[in-house]
Image (spheres, rainbow, N blue to C red):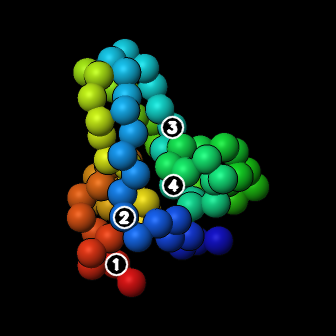
Amino acid sequence: MTTPVRASETPFPVVVEAGKDYYWCSCGLSKSQPLCDGSHKGGSFAPVKYSAAESKTVYFCGCKASAKQALCDGSHSKAV
């Protein structure tokens, strides 16, 4: 697989905690969207680490087309 699966038409809001790391699913196969559950194993994708600088709600990309991996940049409104 060279193109990720589009997991959602919209971003995933996630409350993150300052100082914690989160691993965004880049393949779109994770059953724990938007975070990685290891479903990419054996493929060409790897999770993308997001380190929370502060506690807040962030919006992880669901369409897997964001240039700002792992956060949404609005690509879902353009991607097909």
Residues marked 4 and 3 touching at CB (< 8 Å): no
- Quick one: label 3 or label 1, which is nearer the N terminus? 3
- Locate the N terminus by quadrant: bottom right
Residue identified by numbered label 4: 26
Where 18 sits versus 7, above or below? above
Q: Which mark is residue 23?
A: 3
- Quick one: label 4 or label 2, which is nearer the N terminus? 2
Q: Residue 76 appears in which quarter of the rendering?
A: bottom left
Quick one: 23 or 60, which is closer to the camera?
A: 60
Between marks 4 and 2, how big is the CA–CA gap? Answer: 15 Å
| Residue type of the residue flagged with mark 4 | Ser
Task: Give left or right: position of 46 versus 52.
Answer: right
Q: Residue 45 appears in which quarter of the rendering?
A: bottom right
Where 32 sits versus 18, above or below? below
Element under label 2? loop
Residue 53 visible in image: no
Between marks 4 and 3, how big is the CA–CA gap? Answer: 9 Å
Q: Which mark is residue 70?
A: none
- Locate the C terminus by quadrant: bottom left
Residue identified by numbered label 1: 79
Between marks 4 and 1, how big is the CA–CA gap? Answer: 15 Å
Residue 34 visible in image: yes
| Residue type of the residue flagged with mark 1 | Ala
Task: Give left or right: position of 53 versus 7.
Answer: left
The x and y percentages for residue 31 are 66, 53
Residue at (63%, 53%) from the top-left corner?
30
Task: Give left or right: position of 61 versus 54.
Answer: right
Residue at (41%, 70%) from the top-left corner?
9
Q: Residues within 10 Å of mark 1 (few under 14, many from 20)?
A: few
The x and y percentages for residue 44 are 63, 59
